[in-house]
Image (cartoon, rainbow, N blue to C red):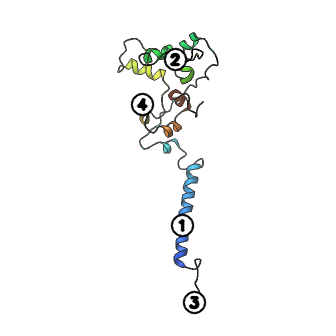
């Protein structure tokens, strides 16, 4: 009796069909994710469970200037320094030849000033902080207003606005 071979063996044919079906389903799932209008095309589908988007109107800061006076740079940092003066230096740059203010790189509103003696838990402090900073679209995921980044923030940054990415890290390659 002749061996019917793989193509005539009902058991082998069933295995091939199951394998082909699995490959086809995996390919369809990949296409569904990748194509515009696919299952994961909406912002909400990309957000982790419980995340919600806060729609914001962002103002894109101009690129950092090639040159400016130390006084011009300081003017772009004075508002920031009303809160951050206690822990940071007046410049992140070691060279005196680099004259950049905080908002030249980070964006935000350097015109916001915190009145001296304002308590961190006061409504005035919260309002000034939120006006001065570029706020995230996913504040719950960032645990905003905590300044500590989540442990796995890379994919979270992919969902954020370029303005927030710049505020968080001006040298991030997604926005430079």
Query: In the figure, is residue 12 to the left or right of 82?
Result: right
Q: Quadrant of residue 85?
A: top left
- Disc 2 is placed on an element classified as loop
Please name the residue that numbered disc 2 is placed on: 91
Please name the residue that numbered disc 3 is placed on: 1
| Residue at (40, 19) in percent of width and height | 125
- Give the mark nearest the N terminus, 2 or 1: 1
| Residue at (64, 19) in percent of width and height | 66
| Distance from Cα at disc 4 to Cα at disc 3 | 74 Å
| Distance from Cα at disc 1 to Cα at disc 4 | 46 Å
Q: Residues within 10 Å of mark 1 (few under 14, many from 20)?
A: few
- Disc 3 is placed on an element classified as loop
Please name the residue that numbered disc 1 is placed on: 19
Q: Residues within 10 Å of mark 3 (few under 14, many from 20)?
A: few
Could you tell me residue 117's position as x and y percent? Answer: 36, 12
Could you tell me residue 113's position as x and y percent? Answer: 46, 14
| Residue at (58, 23) in percent of width and height | 61
Query: In the figure, is residue 140 to the left or right of 98?
Result: left
- Give the mark nearest the N terminus, 4 or 2: 2
The mark closer to the camera, 4 or 2, is 2
Could you tell me residue 72's position as x and y percent? Answer: 58, 12
Q: Quadrant of residue 142?
A: top left
- Give the mark nearest the N terminus, 1 or 4: 1
Q: Is residue 116 visible?
A: yes
């Amino acid at each position: 009796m002749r061996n019917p071979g793989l193509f005539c063996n009902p058991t082998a044919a069933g295995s091939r069909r199951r394998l082909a079906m699995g490959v086809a389903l995996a390919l369809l799932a990949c296409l569904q994710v990748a194509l515009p209008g696919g299952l994961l095309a909406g912002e909400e589908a990309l957000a982790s469970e419980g995340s919600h988007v806060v729609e914001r109107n962002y103002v894109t800061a101009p690129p950092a200037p090639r040159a400016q006076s130390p006084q011009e740079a300081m003017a772009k940092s004075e508002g920031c320094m009303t809160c951050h003066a206690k822990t940071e230096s007046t410049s992140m740059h070691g060279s005196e030849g680099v004259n950049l203010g905080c908002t030249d790189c980070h964006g935000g509103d350097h015109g916001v000033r915190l009145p001296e003696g304002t308590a961190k838990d006061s409504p005035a402090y919260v309002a000034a902080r939120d006006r001065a900073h570029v706020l995230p679209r996913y504040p719950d995921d960032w645990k905003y207003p905590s300044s500590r980044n989540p442990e796995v923030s890379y994919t979270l940054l992919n969902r954020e606005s370029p303005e927030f990415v710049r505020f968080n890290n001006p040298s991030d390659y997604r926005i430079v």
